[in-house]
Image: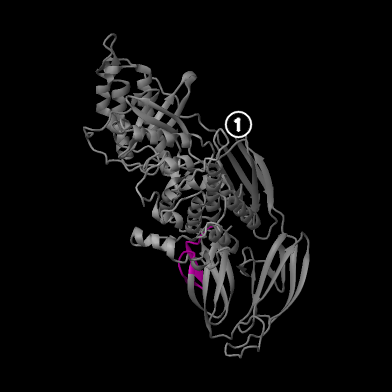
Amino acid sequence: MGRGSRPGVAVPDAPPSGDAPASREALPRAFGKYTLLRELASGGMAKVYLALQRAVAGFEKLVVLKRILPELARDPNFVEMLLAEARTAATLNHPNVVQTFDVGENEGTYFIAMEYINGEDVRSIVRAMKNKSVTEFPLEHTLTIINGMCAGLAYAHEKRGLDGTPLDIVHRDVSPQNVIVTFSGDVKIVDFGIAKSTAAVAAEKTTAGQLKGKVPYMSPEQARGEELDHRSDIFALGIMLFELTTGRRLFKAKSDYETLRLICDRDYPRPSQVKPDYPLALEAVVMRALEKDVTKRYQSARDMQAEIEAFIREEKIAASTVSLSTWMNYLFEEKIAAQKTVLQDVKQLADVIATQQVDAGADWMKETSFTIGAATITGTDLTGFHELKKRQTRMFVGLGLAVAVLGGGGAFVAMKAKKVQATVVEPPPLEPEVKRGKLTVTSEPDHAYVRIAGELQGQTPLSAEKLPIDMELEVKISKEGFEDAFEKVTLTAEKLDQTVVVKLMRGTASLVFSLEPKEAFVVLDEKSTAAPEGGWLKGAKMVELSAGEHKVVFSAPGYAPEVVKWKAAKGEAKTVEIKLRKSVPSSAKPGESASPTLTSPGGRGTVNVNSKGGYCASTMVNGKNVGPTPVAGVSVSAGPVSVVCKTADGKTAMGGGTVKDGETARITVSIH
């Protein structure tokens, strides 16, 4: 498939105007067994359409159809290249790879029919995040996307022909534009248009030194114009993983030449140099994928996928297609609603073609087709949608009430509505409506956090809608000072609306400590002692703690901090004695103290603040607003530091730590 023909991705359309250009094709119209609904893109090789395929028994399917330009269809060398390309793509049948359905000839030209994908590419997702003031790509969604890419590429790389011979397919253009995330949370690699099997590469005659693919996502061997294998795609995967997890471009210079030099000649930065708190295990995955020496790189996408999945398990990251779908629908809520309306409007005209079978109606259709053509149907570009809404009333009056079919001639004749009693047949829905369920969650006490399938939904009382049916959903209800409650719910077509009611039990674990000095600052699980509802710190005792892992930091000006970690069992009472040690001034000679120290009051250090589970729209460090996370290089007085995080939807989370004179402390705030 050629450049600019990615299925399911919007292509900028011409701005709406009162009259259609003379060269614009009248759409919708029949094209063999397909109905061309909307032109999506036009390039030097082909035109790309959204099309409807109909068959017996009411079968309907949306596809993306690429129609080769007639002048190229007369070139036998080009046709052979096209058919070889289509044969390669048609062999691929995997959930994470766009599918090719059909190849044929009609009206003197060739066409390829491909899977229609209702979603957005990764580049468009990043743009939508900016519109929603989301500054950091959530780690769980990044890992879901990269995992899906690994699975799709591994399948393509390992694909064999019918005779068992490896096809050695290499995509050669893995980049954010060629990865689509559907609104149901699926990940699709598209545009295998420059993917080649070994046989195709051997037969291909290209200009020496010609580069194929996007320069910032090329491997060193691709940038040098050398022979490629599947490990070049793995390098591109590493670039995308680096960029999505750090928020920074890896290879971007003033020109393509300088970018190629960065790829081939320079040392690459480690993710932790961009984000100091970057997980070391994930950094190891990134740097192995980015090895310049292909023999040191991952030898298969499946190996890379296995290590990412191990990282997800070990770090207990809530990565899932369900949560990715929820996030996509949040980012593109307005565009999804607009797409559905526009697509239904276009299909209604296609239904007229199918039911009326009037050849002479083409002239009338030309007069109204540009009204439909003013809106892009898929992806991010919905230019002209509002113009369509202004004009659709007039259009459908003309279509439904002011049009009659005369016997014999079969011509459309406009008549006044008051003189004609016409029957308007409502078209069938575009796709069968997918049933979704609703779950209501209440708790005692309320204001407990609710997670469904690992995705934070809000606080009780809560109603979560548009949930999948016939799937077991784990519901977690949690609140500070209470034991976590878990419920498993399966919504069905018979029980679409269900309710979960829980009574949270107070935590039963406690920590008793003797503390010296008594004025020490105490932080429990990255939260200060000023906990809600009066707090859990009573004298020298922490009560009503939930079972599970806890971390307590004791610190005081002029003393070295001490950390206590323990995994509390239900009903456990732990006792500790804390006697903080005086810190040694920074002028102390080497060897005078082997323990970590905190200098006396008056020194200064810096703080880097990051967040997990979301991002802080505003971050208060010792009472000073330093902006959204991540934040680096905040100057503070040496000693205890408090951090208060406020999210975009009004949630508050707290954290804290200590800073040594002349050093940098990293504080991570957990958002629940």
In the depicted structure, whether residue 487 falls above or below residue 293: above
Main structural element of the magenta stretch: helix, strand or loop? loop
Local SS, label 1? loop
The residue wearing badge 1 is 493
In the depicted structure, whether residue 205 falls above or below residue 256: above
Tell me which corner region of the image, top left, top right, bottom left or bottom right, holds residue 507. bottom right
- Who is closer to the viewer here, 55 or 505? 55
Q: Is residue 618 magenta?
A: yes
Q: Is residue 332 visible?
A: no
Left or right of 172 in this view: 638:
right
In the depicted structure, whether residue 511 falls above or below residue 411: below
Image quarter in which the C terminus is found: bottom right
Residue 175 placement (x, y as % from top left): 44, 50
Specify start and end residues of the magenta stretch as a single range.
614-631
Residue 104 placement (x, y as % from top left): 40, 27
Q: Residue at x 53, y 33 (%)?
A: 434
- Who is closer to the viewer here, 291 or 631? 291
Q: Is residue 51 magenta?
A: no
Q: Amino acid at mark 1?
A: Ala
Image quarter in which the N terminus is found: top left
